[in-house]
Image (tube, rainbow, N blue to C red):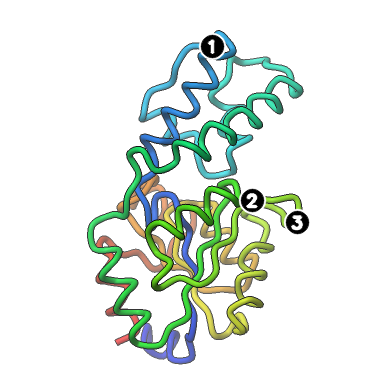
Amino acid sequence: MMNKTFDEVKAVIFDLDGTLLYTLQDLKDSVNHVLEMHGMPERTLTEIRDFVGNGIRKTLERAAVTGTPDDEVEVMYNEFNEYYDKHCMDATGPYDGIPDMLKELYEKGYKLAIVSNKHDTAVKELNEMFFKEYISVAIGESPKVRRKPAPDTAITAMKELGVSSSEAIYVGDSDVDIKTAENAGLPCVSVTWGFRDREFLKENGAEILIDKPEELIEIFS
C-alpha cells in the first residue's frame, strides 16, 4: 500500500530544524544570548528542544520570564534574528545520512524543497551552505506567508517546484509538521531523530515514521 500511495510523487518537501539539520545548540545559544541581554535566566538544551516548533517568536515567548510584555518579546525577536543570522552555523550540521539521502533522491529525479518557521534569511543561508547542490527551493518565515502549521510555505514550495499536492510528500519531525502536511493536503513522513520522539509523534497523528534517513528512499522503491 505504501508503494501505491507514493507512485505519483515527484517532489519531497522537508522541514529543516530537527529533520535535515541539527540546529539545537545554535538555537539555544542564540536564545540565551537574548535572554541574558534582558536579564532573564538561561534555558537548557532540553528546554529549548521543547520550546521550538512554532516559530522563533513563540520560542522566545516560552523561554522568557512569564508575563514578559509583547513589545519586549518583539524586541527580543528582532535581536534574536540579528544574532542568529551571524551564528546559525556555529554548531549546526546535517544529521548523519542526510546528505547521502538527498543526493540519491536528487539523482532519482525528485524535486526537493525546504520549508521552515525559521527566519527566511537563515533558511536560505543554511540551504546555501549545506544543501544547494540538491535543494532548489528554501522558504522561511517572512511577512509574505503565514508560518506553519498554516500551509502557505508548503503551497509556495509546490508552486516554485511546479508540482501539485498529489505529486508531493512532506517530511518533518514534529506535530507542527504533521498539521502542516494535513493543511496542505500532503502525506506526511515523520522522522524520529529530531526534536520529538516516536511516542509523541504517534500521539499527534503520525502514520508513517522512519528512524533513519535511508528509510525515506525505501518508501519510493
Q: How would you rate the neighbour count of disc 3 (Cα within 10 Å): few for under 14, some for 14-19, many for 20 or more?
A: few
Q: Position of residue 207 (x, y in %)?
A: 42, 66
Distance (Cα) linking label 1 and label 3:
32 Å
Question: Which quadrant holds the C terminus?
Answer: bottom left
N-term mark: 1 or 3: 1
Say whether residue 60 is left or right of residue 211. Answer: right
* C-beta proximity under 8 Å, tags 3 and 2: no
Residue beneath disc 3: 144
Q: Position of residue 93 (x, y in %)?
A: 32, 50
For label 1, the SS is: loop
Say whether residue 153 is left or right of residue 3. Answer: right
Q: Tell me the number on the disc at residue 141.
A: 2
Q: Is residue 83 above or below residue 37?
A: below
For label 2, the SS is: strand
Q: Amino acid at mark 3?
A: Lys
Distance (Cα) linking label 1 and label 2:
26 Å
Q: Tell me the number on the disc at residue 40.
A: 1
Q: Residue sitting at 62 percent across and 73 percent down?
A: 185
Q: Residue sitting at 59 percent across and 34 percent down?
A: 82
Q: Amino acid at mark 2?
A: Glu
For label 3, the SS is: loop
Q: Residue sitting at 63 percent across and 25 percent down?
A: 76
Question: Which quadrant holds the N terminus?
Answer: bottom left
Q: Is residue 167 above or below residue 120?
A: below
